[in-house]
Amino acid sequence: MIKLIGILVVILGFVFKVETLFTVLVAGIATGLVAGMDIMDILNTLGQSFVDNRAVSLFIMTLPVIGILERYGLKQRAVYLIQKLGKLTTGGVFSIYMIIRQVAGALSIRISGHPQFVRPLVEPMAQAAAKSKYKNVDVKDEEAIKALSAASENYGNFYGQNLFSGSSGVLLIASTLTGFGYAVSELDIAKASIIMAVIAFLISALQNYLFDKNLNRKYNK
């Protein structure tokens, strides 16, 4: 039971609102000591764990950066850009973003998705496009714009990532088909994904066009 002391340390740390990173570090060291590890083994294990999970750490570190950028005007600049463009519609913002997302996926460029890109940039730009054209937009349509912002990210990422022959999805598909006796390469899978990416874009563009038409009917009476 004493080997579970790390859990107790974490609980006490959260109860007394001690710095989270310090709490986790102390819990790890305490657990290692009661398990009979020497201090160098503990430090090596902690260091190796950090290196193995550094991608997760980098993702978490981007969130406060995005928060600071939002606090100091990122959304306002995105809104200003849309207002300067003038004729760009809400659906147009979504369609352009989906193209960007698919091209980025094909080139294996990571845009980072909802928290780092959609929420601080795409969604405010789409809202600004609607308000620039129709002045007052009701809450229901604002929520619909939020939903379509997220959908554009999901469509673009899902159908765009398989356009890159080295992506994890393509590698999984290729290895699975090869295991079942099909002679396919990663490049074959990427080529076959092009038609689905094009169809997905056309359907999404139609959805965005119909959304713009609905807004026009509703607010241009």
Image: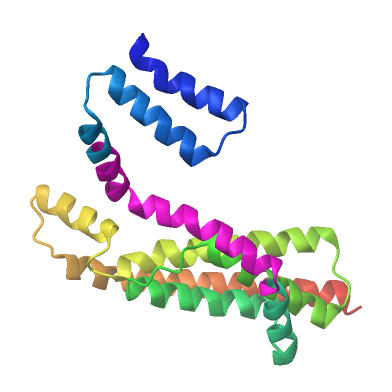
Q: Quadrant of the N terminus?
A: top left
Across and down, in percent, residue 146 comes to 68, 61
Q: Quadrant of the C terminus?
A: bottom right
Q: Which residues are magenta?
A: 45-74
Asked whether 188 or 108 is in front, the reply is 108
Across and down, in percent, residue 11 comes to 53, 23
Q: Was residue 83 drawn as part of the magenta stretch in this picture? A: no
**Among the 4 quarters of the image, the one containing residue 211:** bottom right
Across and down, in percent, residue 109 comes to 37, 72
Across and down, in percent, residue 155 comes to 49, 64
In the image, 121: left or right of 161?
A: right
> Would you say residue 149 is visible in this rendering?
no
**Among the 4 quarters of the image, the one containing residue 193:** bottom left
Instruction: Establish if 133 lies above or below 53.
Output: below
Q: Was residue 48 drawn as part of the magenta stretch in this picture? A: yes
Instruction: Establish if 195 lies above or below 132.
Output: above
Instruction: Establish if 141 lies above or below 173.
Output: below
Name the magenta segment's main secondary structure: helix
Asked whether 35 or 58 is in front, the reply is 35
